[in-house]
Image (tube, rainbow, N blue to C red):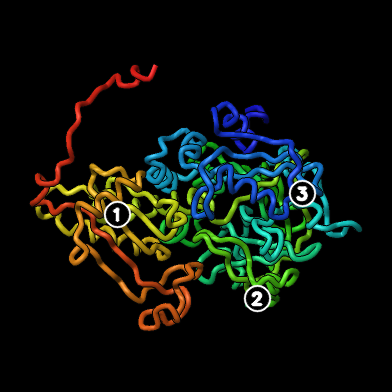
Amino acid sequence: MAKKDVYDLRKVLDELKKEPGQYHETNVEVDPDAELSGVYRYIGAGGTVQRPTQEGPAMMFNNVKGFPDTRVLMGLMASRKRVGKMFHHDYHTLGQFLNDSVENPVDPVMVDEADAPTHEVVHKSTDADFDIRKLVAAPTNTPRDAGPYITVGVVYGSNPDKTMSDVTIHRMVLEDKDKLGIYIMPGGRHIGKFAEEYEKMNKPMPITINIGLDPAITIGATFEPPTTPLGYNELGVAGAIRQEPVQLVKGLTVDEKAIARSEYTLEGYIMPNERIQEDINTHTGKAMPEFPGYDGDANPALQVIKVTAVTHRKDPIMQSVIGPSEEHVSMAGIPTEASILSLTNRAIPGKVLNVYNPPAGGGKLMTIMQIHKDNAADEGIQRQAALLAFSSFKELKTVFLVDEDVDIFDMNDVVWTINTRFQADQDIMVLPGMRNHPLDPSERPEYDPKSIRTRGMSSKLVIDGTVPFDMKDQFERAQFKEVKDWEKYLK
């Protein structure tokens, strides 16, 4: 295989440029401090971003103030249809596609240093002028951010005896010339489990942070238990998506692996028993905008990464996302759909036809399930499906259940079922006092003291918009004539 044909971000972008309306670049100067994200908010952020926003093209900013040799890419995955194009797959069934990829992983492979473009340019912390704030064009999303953030950096790490490795994505803020703060949600990530083991040993944990990656890696890396249990390296999912293994290379300053074709690699250590105030440089009280659409609170005690090197490709591309944008929906939502389908396919095969985690829930908080009922004995199976969804993904808050004649990707069609196939006194299930996601601002004790004892608990909701099987003939939609060649009337 010729090197130029190896699968990476640049190969994906070359393909994307051929798709009308999917890619745009600008040479107009933009400030990475709030302005860059502010511009893309209007052009293509979508998701739960403050309106006005819209679905638009991926955007390459070629003229970034303060970083003359760096381009910044935003919005690559901020469209489900665009993700489908990049994966060469129907966007409607991406969840099942990823589910198949989990079950048939293609493991990563090691390559020699000569085949690792991420090491083309090397800056070590021992260099006199080393400063990550000048080397890494990490944008701030808003003027209130705690600092510049790495928002789509894939952290690669292993347990102390190197028997298990994992990749995860975390928010990481640039705090000093060689120091990052990293937020690892308690109990939520395998990297956190490994870091706990190192901390008990009072040893620093070697890691690499890989930025500027193809979407198979950034979407595949966001799988969580139970779909990918402890010890499952999600780079195998990426290999299956693209049918080509992810290439790894040995780190230069740490005993850990890096993704060989990433645009940037930061090497360093998660320091044991060391913490830092997230907004120590700004004192805004805020971190950055998170997926529910609100600014996250600054964490008083982030774990600390001591950076030992920054390496990058020539003419590097810094990749970033807006926290509440449609990109988060793609990265978090599609793997969640796969996890739900995996569990329901095993437990109640044939009853859940498809699943969609829409932008309204940021990819995490809401799912829509398309249900198939064969006979009267299937009545109630739809609610069983909802419980399975909650058990497969603890951060899920709301489930909509709809029939197979409803387009789950059209919220008007989904809400139509609530107006014509739903009675509130019998078609709502409320499950109080369950665990959910602490970034939802309503999940705090003062909001609901009777059910929420600690931050991050929630009452969960099932809205059953399916028709009772024995009344199915009374809910048939108006049937229009099928016209196969309807598009000729537009020519």
Measure the alpha-carbon separation of dots 3 and 2.
Answer: 28 Å
| Mark 1 / mark 3, whichever is N-terminal | 3
Measure the alpha-carbon separation of dots 2 and 1.
Answer: 38 Å
Q: Residue at x 80, y 47 (%)?
A: 67
Q: Which residue is mark 1?
A: 344
Percent x, y for residue 10? Answer: 65, 35
Q: Which residue is mark 3?
A: 311
| Mark 2 / mark 1, whichever is N-terminal | 2
Q: Residues within 10 Å of mark 1 (few under 14, many from 20)?
A: many
Percent x, y for residue 80? Answer: 46, 42
Q: Amino acid at mark 2?
A: Ala
Quarter of image, res 14 = top right
Q: Residue at x 52, y 60 (%)?
A: 293
Q: Residue at x 26, y 56 (%)?
A: 347
Q: Amino acid at mark 1?
A: Thr
Q: Which residue is mark 2?
A: 301
Q: Which label sits in the foreground, 2 or 1?
A: 2
